[in-house]
Amino acid sequence: EQLHDGGKPHKSLECGKSFSQSNTLIQHERIHTGERPCEHSECRERFHTSSNLLRHQQLQKEERSFCCPDCGKGFKHNSSLITHRRIHTGERPYQCGECGKSFIQRSNLINHQRIH
């Protein structure tokens, strides 16, 4: 069900985010419940959506062995995966001592500190 007027009648009871299609809400709710029904038959890693599983499978073919369990994105280096996962966790470990603004990557903090 989708409204033609651009409305979003399907609302998450957990966070309040709204969606125009019910299947998109169902996929979104898996973030809150932790449900990961899509399993990769070779490595047994599980994903929220079939599209994330497909992305994971394609990346494994490209020899990106460090894979994000949240979205399926793959990386050649574990350090890149660690940095990427901060997008999902909200972790910002690099904080400016002058203004308190925090960053995911150290290089972004260094660039920021140049403006002070």
Image: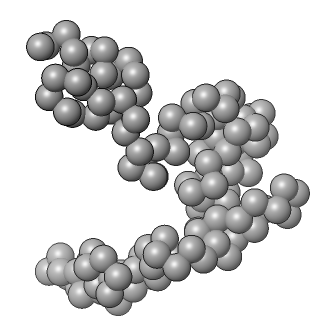
**Residue at image location 57% in from the left, 57% down from the top:** 70
Spot the residue most to the top: 114
Quadrant assignment, res 17: bottom left
Locate residue 83, reporting x and y percent: 51, 35
The answer to whether one can see residue 52 in this image is yes
On the image, which quarter does residue 100 sit in?
Answer: top left
**Eyeballing the image, is 38 above or below 97?**
below
- Going by the image, does 40 lie left or right of 37? right
For the rendered model, the colour scheme is one colour
Residue at the image point whose x is 29% and y is 84% from the top: 11
The quadrant in which the N terminus is found is bottom left
Quarter where residue 45 is shown: bottom right
Compared with residue 74, is residue 51 higher up or lower down, i.e. above or below?
below
Tell me: 106 left or right of 112: right
Residue 98 image position (x, y, % from top left) = 16, 23
Give how far across and how far down residue 105 sits, in percent: 41, 27
Task: Relative to 97, say whether 92 is above or below.
Answer: below
Describe residue 35's horizontal placement relative to residue 110 as left or right: right
The answer, for residue 2, to whether it is visible in the render is no
Taking the spot 63% from the left edge, 55% from the top edge, the residue there is 69
Residue 59 location, x and y as percent? 69, 42
